[in-house]
Image (cartoon, grey):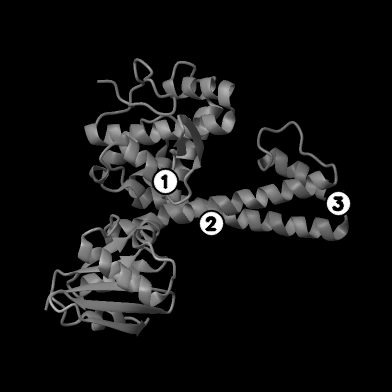
Amino acid sequence: MKEYISFDSHKRYTLAEREQIESGRVKQQRIEHRPGAIAAYLAGAQPGRGVAVEATGNWYWIVAEIERARLVPRLVHPRKAKLMMGMINKTDKLDVHGLNRLQRNGTLPTVWIAPGELRDLRELTRVRMVLSRQRGSLKNRIQATLAKWGLVVEEVSDVFGLAGRVQIQGLLDQLPPHTAWSSRLLLEQLDFVQKQSDEHEKRLLELLKQTPAMQLLKTLPGVGVILSAVMALEIGQVDRFASGERLASYAGTTPRVISSGGKTRHGQLRPDVNRYLKWAYMEAANVVAMNNKRWPDRHAARLYRRLRENKGHAKAIGAVARHLAEASWHVLTRKESYRDPAVTGPSQQGVSAVSS
């Protein structure tokens, strides 16, 4: 029986709808989440039929069960689907029916589903990012506590290096007793997170083979082993992007454009993007910024300096990140190492990365 199937999934349950193509008959059913529940519901469905499911936080196991039932998962972009449905009211029943309406019209906004092995590998780089944020948060908290009492670690390049830690221990003795005790607790937690981060990075380097894509991405300015791994895993199949501009948009490095009445204004970067890929390109751009004097002739460094003078550090970082994102598409598509463009193009926010 030919039918449209859609899921509106939540944390503990999924509302499913099956709509027969010929008769238009609709049947909705609530499925309580448990292992095998989705596959059991789909038993008897025509193999190869598409099943629409929104890209919510728990879609991994739902997609796996749809595939186990020999159907084809169609992962839906939630924000675009909501705009295309055009509904004022929002209920589970309306949402799931709206997904089937988009399937019937052939306008369902789907996104790429990474293979299971790739999704598993992504957890390595994503967890490392979590550990890095925790480490940075702890360092900032400790330094803020010292600053509240007018205490500063001086004449060291790394505040939390060996020499810096010796100074910190001495400064903690000058704090009030409860504040000192709390700060020492944060130092112990920082050491634990640092140990976990080192172990995680060691495993990451052991398991992640240096693929051709990673080797090409490492030729980008500011990109090393870890960032190249993040970029390669998050990009996946580069041919799913029609151009470097599309990849840059997916990575969240392109600003919003507001144009009306002959006036054009560029707004902030978009939030509904791949935030892991955005982080990687922003990190690489910051590396370029920190080393711009050491790389005076590199295109990315010149781009950063020029825009920093005219528009400030933040916008210059965004422009370099966009350039690197577009460059990634070029080097991966052409299978060539990054080379600085011979001539800067008309756009100052990102240009073709590889000379012809």
Work out whether mark 2 precedes mark 3 in sequence or the reverse, and give the earlier one: 3
Image coordinates of residue 209 in percent, x first then y, are: 31, 47
Residue at position x 38%, y 18% in the image: 344
| SS at badge 3 | loop
Q: Which residue is mark 3?
A: 175
Residue to which mark 2 is pinned: 196
Q: In the rendered structure, which amino acid carries the disc numbered 2?
A: Gln
Element at label 2: helix
Quarter of the image containing the C terminus?
Answer: top left
Q: Earlier in the sequence, mark 1 or mark 2?
A: 2
Residue at horizontal 66%, vertical 32%? 157
Inspect this view and state whether residue 170 appears: no
Characterize the local packing of mark 2: few (<14), some (14-19) or many (20 or more) Cα atoms within 10 angstroms: some
Q: Is residue 202 left or right of residue 108?
A: right
Q: CA distance from mark 2 to mark 3?
A: 29 Å
Mark toward the viewer: 3 or 1: 1
Q: Tag 1: Cα neighbours inside 10 Å, few (<14), some, or many (≥20)? A: many
The amino acid beneath tag 1 is Leu
Label 1 to label 2: alpha-carbon separation: 23 Å
Q: Please identify, in this view, whether the residue under mark 1 or under mark 2 is nearer the observer.
A: 1
Residue at position x 52%, y 32% from top? 317
Vertical arrangement, residue 102 with respect to residue 36, above or below: above
Horizontal arrangement in the rendering, residue 65 relative to residue 305 (left or right): left
Disc with the residue nearer the chain's start (3 vs 1): 3
Task: Identify whether 186 is placed above or below 338.
Answer: below
Amino acid found under the numbered disc labelled 3: Leu
Residue 59 is situated, as x and y percent measured from the top left of the image, at 35, 67
Q: Badge 1 is on which residue?
A: 277
